[in-house]
Amino acid sequence: MKILAATDGSERSMKAVLRGLELAEKEGADVTLIAVAPSLTALLSDVEELPGNVQESLDAEAIKAVDKAKALFDEKGIKVATMIGRGVTPANVILETAENGKFDLILMGSTGKTGFAKILIGATATKVVANAPCSVGIIR
């Protein structure tokens, strides 16, 4: 079984990662962890240059989320693949990755970080469930 576990580092997304770890331990599932950094250059296509290191900061947050999740697998000595996606909508990146990678299951939290990000992740989960090419597990 190939599992794509999406994380943003939030509590609920980390529960989804733990479910992936459990399936890797008990059933030998191959797990890939993905975090998606918003692509400001795609969003702001008419802007010639972004101020400062805004995109780098967004990328760093995604890397931090994946590293946090990977550490759980490393503690148990379980192999896990990691990837950082970048796109305007995280759901589209997750869906494209699941389809291209021929994953059997997508695991993700029902909501993500607090505030505006929480709303976006809830919308992300809804879009992934509605359009996924495979089964989806939404973890609360």
Image (spheres, grey):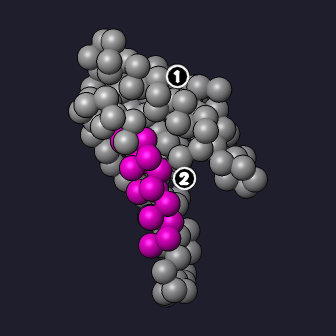
| Pair 2/1: label in front | 1
Towards the viewer: 76 or 85? 76
Instruction: Give coordinates of residue 71: x percent, y percent.
Output: 37, 42
Where 55 sits versus 87, above or below?
below
Q: Nearer the viewer, residue 96 or 22?
A: 22
Q: Is residue 102 left or right of residue 53?
A: left
Residue 8 shows in the view: yes
Residue extending furthest toward the right:
115
Q: Is residue 24 left or right of residue 50?
A: left
Task: Tell me what residue is drawn at x 47 percent, y 23 percent.
Answer: 19
The local crowd at label 1, few if under 14, some if 14 to 19, many if 20 or more residues have their Cα within 10 Å, is some
Which structural element holds mark 2?
loop
Q: Position of residue 6 (x, y in %)?
A: 47, 39
Range of residues picked out in magenta: 56-70
Query: Does the magenta portion include 58?
Result: yes
Q: Which residue is mark 2?
A: 89
Q: Is residue 140 magenta?
A: no
State the residue position of label 1. 137
**Looking at the picture, which amino acid does disc 1 mark?**
Gly
Give how far across and how far down residue 84 sits, in percent. 37, 53
User: Quarter of the image containing the N terminus?
Assistant: top left
Q: CA distance from mark 2 to mark 1?
A: 19 Å
Residue 73 at what x, y percent from top left?
34, 34
Residue 119: mark: none
Dominant secondary structure (helix, strand or loop) of the stretch shown in magenta: helix
Residue 128 visible within the image: no
Q: Residues within 10 Å of mark 2 (few under 14, many from 20)?
A: some
Which element carries disc 1, helix, strand or loop? Answer: strand
Q: Residue at x 32, y 21 (%)?
A: 24
